[in-house]
Image: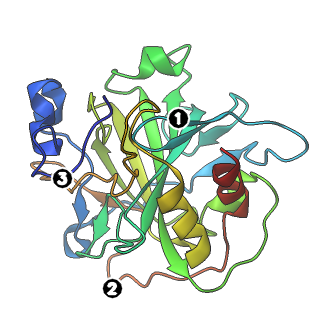
Amino acid sequence: MPPRWGNYSRDGESHWNQHFPYCAGPLQSPIAFKTAKLIFDASLRPIVLENYDLTGGRNLNLTNSGHSFQVVLPSTMTISGLPQRYTAAQLHIHWGSKTSPLGSEHTVDSKRYAAELHIVHYNSEKYPNVSMAFDKSDGLAVLGVFIEVTTNSHNIPAFDIRTLMPQRLDEYFRYDGSLTTPPCYQSVQWTVFKNPITVSQAQYDTLTTTLFASSANQAIAVPLINNFRKPLPIENRVVLSSFKLGKIAFHERRMAVNAISYQLQCY
């Protein structure tokens, strides 16, 4: 049974810890970023993406995981700019619904975005694969990208993952946290970029109406919507920023994810 969200369901996120104890831990994700409390760290380097352009005939495996769609990524994709080198494993998105397009997991000064892209990587300097790294305290690094809905869009090359990232990779929030779905292992070094990307309203509607959380043999189809976890307490954690403090101005950039929308429609 995939995880359920919301605190009113009998098996919703407030009850996850009954079966997954880590979900009640002190280093849980997501969190609510408060710009007034960020600590600027000049040593934080820009994230460097390597081999993120997957165009040229390559096929990617896309599946419905029950709580999102998931795209398996090749091990040639890596990131640097962190203390270790990390290799890509998969990407997925959290979103709201067609009628309530507010589904990002992290928030910034109480602002929630329409959706949030997560690209999951594992510490390939210490672990041979993502399964071995999954529950280790230094095992994972996730890149988080906020997504806004805009009325403008244009075509992009199919699955050029770099095009799904914001233009500036040197402005981000950094903190230690967890997976945002069970088993909630506290194994993630989070990098959440300050600037969002944009998708069209039509693409967002496709995202929120194509997948279902119910199994094929269920009589009533349950749409997969609002698959985001609410922010958790920061506790004693320090949240760093790679940019100097001050009012955050989120710069819009016109780009879209036609490739993913097309794959979802074909799924």
Q: Quadrant of residue 166?
A: bottom right
**Position of the N terminus by quadrant:** top left
> Which element carries disc 3, helix, strand or loop?
loop
The label shown at residue 247 is 2
Q: Amino acid at mark 2?
A: Lys
Q: In the rendered image, which residue does mark 1 sit on?
A: 121
N-terminal-most mark, 3 or 1: 3
Q: Nearer the viewer, residue 7 or 139?
A: 7
Residue drawn at (61%, 61%), measured in percent from left and top?
165
Instruction: Classify mark 1: residues with Cα within 10 Å, few (<14), some (14-19) or many (20+).
Output: many
189 relative to 169 in the view: left or right:
left
Q: Is residue 64 visible?
A: yes
Q: Quadrant of residue 28?
A: top left
Residue 9 versus residue 78 in the image, above or below: below
Residue drawn at (56%, 23%), measured in percent from left and top?
124
Residue 214 versus residue 155 in the image, above or below: above
> Which element carries disc 2, helix, strand or loop?
loop
Q: Are marks 3 and 1 in contact (CB under 8 Å)?
A: no
Q: Quote the CA–CA distance across marks 3 and 2.
A: 31 Å
Q: Is residue 200 visible?
A: no
Q: In the rendered image, which residue does mark 3 sit on?
A: 6
Residue drawn at (42%, 33%), measured in percent from left and top?
215
> Which element carries disc 1, helix, strand or loop?
strand
N-terminal-most mark, 2 or 1: 1
In the image, residue 48 lies at what x, y percent? 64, 50
Q: Are marks 2 and 1 in contact (CB under 8 Å)?
A: no
Instruction: Classify mark 2: residues with Cα within 10 Å, few (<14), some (14-19) or many (20+).
Output: few
Picture mark count: 3
Residue drawn at (30%, 42%), measured in percent from left and top?
180
Q: Quote the CA–CA distance across marks 2 and 1.
A: 30 Å
Q: Quote the CA–CA distance across marks 3 and 1.
A: 27 Å
27 relative to 161 in the view: left or right:
left
